[in-house]
Image: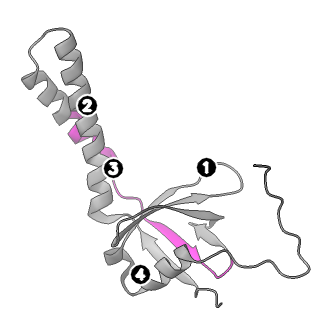
Amino acid sequence: MRAPPAVAVRCTGGWPWRLLNVALPTLAAGVFSAWALLHLEAPVIVPAAAAAAVALLLAWRLSRPRERLLQWDGQCWTADGMPGRLQLMIDLGPFLLLRLHPKQGRGPWLAVTAAEAGAAWHALRAAVYSRPPETPAGATRPERAAD
């Protein structure tokens, strides 16, 4: 079986990722403040809406999209030059949420849309779903952890 071709995609996640990054904190702030106010037997609607509005503005300001370069060279995945193992987290058809696991530290979450990837979308999906390349005959395979 052939290995998928090399592919490089600039990804920010587009509007779906930004919407998610704004909507979740807004919803959490509104629900938490409503719960706290109900617990205190205080009026709920206006203060909870105000807390949600503040969270919305803050989340919008902090959720500026960060563009990353995701690359597959046929052997290894890199995100902005950081090599690692790529894991598919969510596949919604025209939207992929991926996680890069480098050897050291924590890797980035990468959101990619079909619109951002353009003509490279098919190659990207093929590379994401392909098996890792076989190790050469002389190389040793890494040990697996005991199950």
User: Does the residue at mark 1 contact the one at mark 2 (Cβ under 8 Å)?
Assistant: no
Magenta region: which residues? 54-75
Say if the magenta span includes residue 62: yes
Secondary structure of the residue carrying tag 4 is helix
Amino acid type at circle 2 is: Ala
**Residue under numbered circle 1:** 106
Q: Position of residue 51 (x, y in %)?
A: 19, 28
User: Does the residue at mark 1 contact the one at mark 3 (Cβ under 8 Å)?
Assistant: no
Amino acid type at circle 4 is: Trp
**Residue under numbered circle 2:** 29
Residue sitting nearer the eye, 115 or 134? 134
Between marks 1 and 2, how big is the CA–CA gap? Answer: 27 Å
Secondary structure of the residue carrying tag 3 is loop
**Residue under numbered circle 4:** 121
Between marks 4 and 3, how big is the CA–CA gap? Answer: 24 Å
Q: Position of residue 99 (x, y in %)?
A: 53, 58
The circle drawn on residue 63 is 3
